[in-house]
Amino acid sequence: MNKKIMKKYNIAYLMHGARNVGGGEYSIYLLIKNLRRDIFETIVFYAHENEIIKKLREDGIQVVNIPLSKRITSVYRDRIKKSPASLFIYVRYLVAGIFEIVRHLKKYKVDILHPHDNLSKIIGGLAAKISGVKVVAHCHDLLKESLIEKVLILYQLLFLDRIIAVSENVRRQFKVRGKIPAKVQTIYNAIDLGRYNLTPLKNNSLRKEFRITERDIVIGIIALFDDCKGHIYLFQALKRLVSEGMTNIICLVVGDGRRREELNSFVRNENLQDYITFLGYRNDIPEILKITDILVVPSVRESFGMVALEAMATKTPVIASAVGGLPEVIEDNKTGLLFPKGDIDSLCKALRYLIENPNIRKEMGEVGRKRVEEYFGIDSNIKKTEELYVEVMGN
């Protein structure tokens, strides 16, 4: 950013906070935390306090509660699909939320609104237009499958001044009549490499906690418990490998979500408790990755794949579905292995190959770390986003 900025810009981030915390939430947290304070004054509007809001408050970021009805913050898109009447209730509370945000935009003299999640984009986009405020938002989703998702694509094109696609795959879904509008730009997600240092763990407390022996191969999956994350495909692959005599496997499952009971039931019914351990949410992801030999991302839909970056940063090779933005993150046969989504045979083959070839795992881990350092560091991500903010203000 070479030109001198004559004034500070007031940027408000909007997130309802009722959803589970995932990679997208940590990405926006890093952006807010690292934004240049000599150019931008930041404030965060939220409806429900979650882990990210608490961390921002601890970091000294101003956070302001905006009351939004649970009627809209707790509604999943599939509920609206099943009950058209739910849509009318949804719209009623949306309108109330829009005018509440208009009030806050004026009160805090906001120049740019950056809504985070889809609900925030809907109410924030309209509120910003009413208030004459610029709107910039990330798109972390792969849409266009259902009518509602197609409407979300159109809405963003109409009401957002800039759309930050987290991968080229996400950017392409905004194509209109064969062309992608200039307002849609790709800025890859990034991670703070300082958090993923390569210093070995000082003791074996985690291995003891999870009852991991020296002969065990540790396989990890870190994701919300949702159908799109593909846990069941990994569990089915592990079941097959165990039945074939590969019993030195420990799978650490980090996360939680609405499919918790289904996944737990599968593990119990298939007698896989000795091989699959549910850890719930954890705040020590870098440490867990350091004891992980292979990370698996078996998603059927994935816009980017932050957890793949986290694994690569700790020199952990990744096996992932060749969907969405994952092939842009992982170099097949270099930093990990890609397989067709839902293909149990291919996943088993990839797991067996890396389990039986520790030297390949080590080599892939080394290359993966270098790739993250070169393309996915936080400094480059922040700089590009700051330049976009200044550009949208016409400076």
Image (cartoon, rainbow, N blue to C red):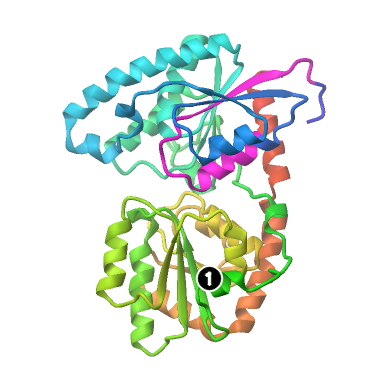
Residue in the foreground of this view, choosing between 63 and 155: 63
Q: Residue furthest bottom?
A: 245
Which quadrant of the structure image shows residue 310?
bottom right
Asked where in the image residue 117 lies, by quadrant, the reply is: top left
What residue is rendered at 78% in x and 25% in y? 38
Q: Residues within 10 Å of mark 1 (few under 14, many from 20)?
A: few
Q: Classify the position of the C terminus by image quarter.
A: top right
Q: Is residue 222 left or right of residue 291?
A: left
In the image, residue 333 lies at what x, y percent? 57, 72
Nearer to me, 392 or 275: 275
Q: Is residue 107 left or right of residue 348?
A: right
Up the image or down, 21 lies above or below 281; here it is above
Q: Which residue is mark 1?
A: 209
The vertical placement of 232 against 30, above or below, is below
Q: Residue at x 73, y 44 (%)?
A: 379
Report whether 263 appears left or right of 374: left
The magenta segment: 5-32
Residue 269 x %, y % = 24, 73
**SS category of the residue bearing label 1:** helix
Q: Amino acid at mark 1?
A: Glu
Q: Is residue 338 left or right of residue 193?
A: left
Residue 273 location (% of width, % of height): 35, 74
> Is residue 11 on the magenta stretch?
yes
Q: Residue at x 55, y 15 (%)?
A: 133
